[in-house]
Image: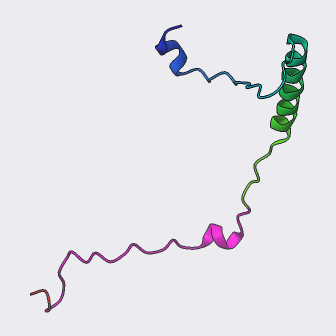
């Protein structure tokens, strides 16, 4: 793959073994369990929709700040 091909692709997860010497079957079991747990968590993850009251729907927005760079009145110098 070129760098153009991998630029848009997600980076593959990395597993780092810090102790022991697991064999291929143990690593495969670990990957299967972690993948399954991740999939269940991703399926159950739901973002809460914000509650919008009738007051928030009908209220007027805040006014824009006054422009201090425009002189006005008889004190404009």
Pinpoint residue 4: horizontal percent, then vertical percent. Answer: 47, 14
Task: Name above or below for residue 62 compared with residue 39.
Answer: below
Pinpoint residue 24: horizontal percent, then vertical percent. Answer: 85, 11
Task: Name above or below for residue 19 compared with residue 46.
Answer: above
Q: Quadrant of residue 23?
A: top right
Task: Name above or below for residue 42 compared with residue 71.
Answer: above
Q: Residue at x 75, y 48 (%)?
A: 47
Q: Residue at x 88, y 21 (%)?
A: 32
Q: Is residue 8 left or right of residue 15?
A: left
Q: Is residue 21 left or right of residue 2?
A: right
Q: Main secondary structure of the magenta part?
A: loop
Closest to the observer, 69 or 52: 69
**Magenta segment includes 63:** yes
Q: Is residue 40 left or right of residue 68?
A: right
Q: Residue at x 51, y 20 (%)?
A: 7
Q: Residue at x 84, y 38 (%)?
A: 41
Stretch of the chain drawn in magenta: 51-74
Residue farthest toward the front in the current orientation of the protein? 20
**Magenta segment includes 47:** no
Residue farthest toward the left in the current orientation of the protein? 77
């Amino acid at each position: 793959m070129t760098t153009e091909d991998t630029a848009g692709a997600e980076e593959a997860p990395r597993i780092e073994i810090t102790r022991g010497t697991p064999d291929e079957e143990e690593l495969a079991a670990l990957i299967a369990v972690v993948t399954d747990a991740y999939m269940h968590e991703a399926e159950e993850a739901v973002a809460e929709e914000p509650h919008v009251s009738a007051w928030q729907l009908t209220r007027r927005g805040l006014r824009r700040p006054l422009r201090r760079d425009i002189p006005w009145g008889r004190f404009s110098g």
